[in-house]
Image (cartoon, rainbow, N blue to C red):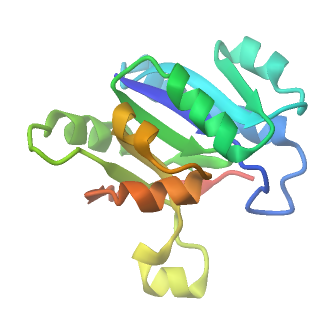
Amino acid sequence: MLSTIVFCEDKPASPAVGDLAGVLARTLASLVTAKVEGLLGDVRIAGPAGNGLTVLANHAGCALIEAENEADWLAAALQAARGPDVFLLRCGRAPEAGFIEEARDFLAGGGSDRPHTACLRCVPETFLERLFPPTAPVAGLIAPRDLLLRAPGGGFATLARYIAPSTTFRTRARRIF
């Protein structure tokens, strides 16, 4: 089982994201099947303080980690994660169908000396991303908790560069805002 952190960014990827709670609710809803099928264990929400996410977290049965900046709420959420492996997902993204099977296969294929890390990229949206799908931004990461805790301070993008995932999933994460 993966400890899951839904990461709310300080500066959303789109100015159209006005209702963080609504976008977060849709992100959490996309994870229900993975939770029911036993892929995901504990789920935490990491985000900025003072956005009124407490009620949503309580209704969803998630822990809420709030802090003043991205680096702080990410570090606190990683410290609070229970399992040895973490799935970190950007708020506003939803894994496509097939993610559960692909992630389960990835987790079952461990055993090498190198840390087992993977990324889930966004569905290509721009012309350049459609021409070169590997240039699409990272929407999610799966990595050992210990490796994530050793990463230098910073936000999601810094963490993704530090991890340098060894595997990129074929499934993508679609934008839901």
Residue 1, above or below 153: above
Q: Position of residue 47 (x, y in %)?
A: 73, 36
Residue 122 horizontal side relative to residue 66, left or right: left
Q: Is residue 47 at all visible to an observer of this figure?
A: yes
Q: Position of residue 162 (x, y in %)?
A: 42, 58
Residue 38 horizontal side relative to residue 48, left or right: left
Question: Residue at the spot x=23%, y=35% of the render?
Answer: 107
Q: Is residue 29 at all visible to an observer of this figure?
A: no
Q: Position of residue 42 (x, y in %)?
A: 50, 17
Residue 62, above or below 33: above
Q: Which of the pair 160/89 is nearer the observer? A: 160
Residue 150, above or below 127: above
Question: Residue at the spot x=75%, y=29% of the render?
Answer: 66
Residue 106, above or below 77: below
Residue 57 horizontal side relative to residue 118, left or right: right
Question: Residue at the spot x=67%, y=33% of the render?
Answer: 46
Give the number of marks: 0
- Please tell me in which quadrant of the rendered image residue 3 appears: top left
Q: Position of residue 173 (x, y in %)?
A: 51, 54
Question: Residue at the spot x=36%, y=33% of the render?
Answer: 146
Work out which quarter of the rendered image holds the N terminus and state it: top left
Q: Which of the pair 85/140 is nearer the observer? A: 85
Residue 50 horizontal side relative to residue 63, left or right: right
- Please tell me in which quadrant of the rendered image residue 64 appears: top right
